Image: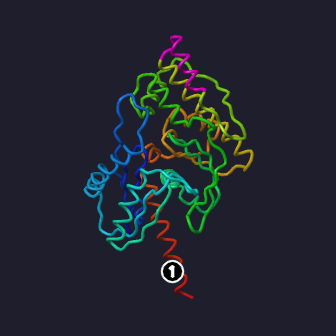
Amino acid sequence: MPEFLGIDTSNYTTSAAIYYSDENKAVQQKKLLPVKDGALGLRQSDAVFHHTKQLPQIVEILCEKASISEITAVSASARPRSADGSYMPCFLCGEGFGRSYAALEKLPFYPSAHQTGHILAALYSADRLGLINQPFIAFHVSGGTTDCLLCKPDHDDILSITPISSSLDLHAGQAVDRVGLMLGLKFPCGAELEKLAEKAGKHYKQKPTVKNGCCCLSGIENQCRSMLEKGESRENIAAYCLDHIGSAIISMADFVVEKYGSLPLIFAGGVMSNRLIRKMIISKYSEAEFAEAEFSCDNAVGIAIYAYLKWERENADNYSNSDK
C-alpha cells in the first residue's frame, strides 16, 4: 500500500504525517513549540532550535502509532507561500530532514509551501480534494495570514495560488493572541478566547474596515483594551474580538464573491477552527467548507497529500509516455 510522508515545521508546531492513498486515510503527530508565559510568539532562532529538538521525537511517535512499510515519496514545507522570495528559517528544519530521508531511501522529494498544505488539509478534511481540478476560493486565516486566495489547477505544482486580498495591518490570529494575552490567557490564545466568548452576555454587530477586499484589524486590540479599562467583562471582550474578525472575513468573502462569482469557498488555518466564527460565516455562506479542528491548525497532513498528488501526477505522465 503506497504511503506518503509529510513534514511541517511551522512557526509554532512541529508535525509529521503519513497519508495512505489506497484508503484515503491520514495519521499525524504534532506538538506545539514551547512559548514562555506572557510572550507573544517566538523568535525564528528559537523556533529552529525547538524544531530541531522536537522533530525526531515526533517522527518516533508517528512510527509507533502508524503502520509504515512502503514510503513512496516525501514532502516537507520549505517556505510559507508559493511565491518568489517566500522564506522563514523554521521551515529549513523539516525540509532538511525530508530531503535527507528521501535521499537515503532513494525516494522522490517534493518541497511544498506551508500554505498549500493548509489548503490541501482543508480539502481532505471536507472530503473535497476533487476541487484541485477546478477554480475555487480559499481563505487561509492564522497567526501569520489573513489571506483570500484564488486557487486553480496547476500541472507543475498541483495548485496555482494567486492572492486576492489580505489584512492591511494585523492578521486575525495576531489579534486573537494580543487580546487573549490582554485578558490573561496563555499563548496561543485561540481555544481559551473561544471558551470565554461562549459565556458572553452579549454579541456585537460590527462594521469592519474593508478596502478592495482587504481588511484592517488593528482597531480590535485598541477597542478591547478600552473595554477592559471601562470594566467590561472578559467574556464580552472576547466576544467582541471574535465578532469583529468574523465580520471582517464575511466582508472579504462578499468582495470576492462579487468579483469572481459563486466559486466554492474553502476556509483553512487555525483561526478557522473557531466555532463562533464558523457559525457567523455559515449563516451567510451556507455552502462554505471548513476543515475539522485537527486539520485547521498547522499540520503535516496536507503536505503528505501533496507528496501523493505530485507522485501520482508524475507517474501518470510516465505511464502515458510509455504507451506512446
Expressed as whole percent of the image width and height from the top left, the position of residue 38 reads: 39, 28
Toward which corner of the image does residue 253 lie, by quadrant?
Answer: top right
The structure residue drawn at horizontal position 39% and vertical position 45%, both measured from the top left corner, is 45
Residue lying at the far top of the rendered structure: 230
Asked which quadrant contains residue 172, the reply is: top right
Q: Residue at x 47, y 29 (%)?
A: 194
Task: Kindly identify which residue carries mark 1.
Answer: 318
* Residue lying at 68% horizontally and 27% vertically, measured from the top left: 207
Judging from the image, what secondary structure is the residue with disc 1 in? helix
Residue 10 position, x and y percent, is: 43, 48
Percent of width and height locating residue 96:
38, 60
Image position, residue 98 (x, y; %): 38, 62
Render colour scheme: rainbow
Q: Say if the magenta span includes residue 300.
A: no
| Residue nearer the viewer, 55 or 288 | 55
Mark 1 Cα shell of 10 Å, populated few (<14), some (14-19), many (≥20): few
Q: For residue 230: magenta? A: yes
The type of residue carrying mark 1 is: Asn
**Residue 205 vertical placement versus 311 (above, below):** above
Q: Quadrant of the N terminus?
A: bottom left
How many marks the image carries: the answer is 1
Q: Is residue 265 left or right of residue 271?
A: right
- At 64% from the left edge and 24% from the top edge, which residue is drawn? 205
Q: Hey, which residue is sitting farthest bottom in the picture?
A: 324
Q: Quadrant of the C terminus?
A: bottom right
Magenta span: chief secondary structure = helix
Spot the residue most to the right. 259
Describe residue 94's horizontal placement relative to residue 137 as left or right.
left
The image quarter in which residue 19 lies: bottom left
Q: What span is in magenta? A: 219-233
Foreground of the two, 125 or 173: 173
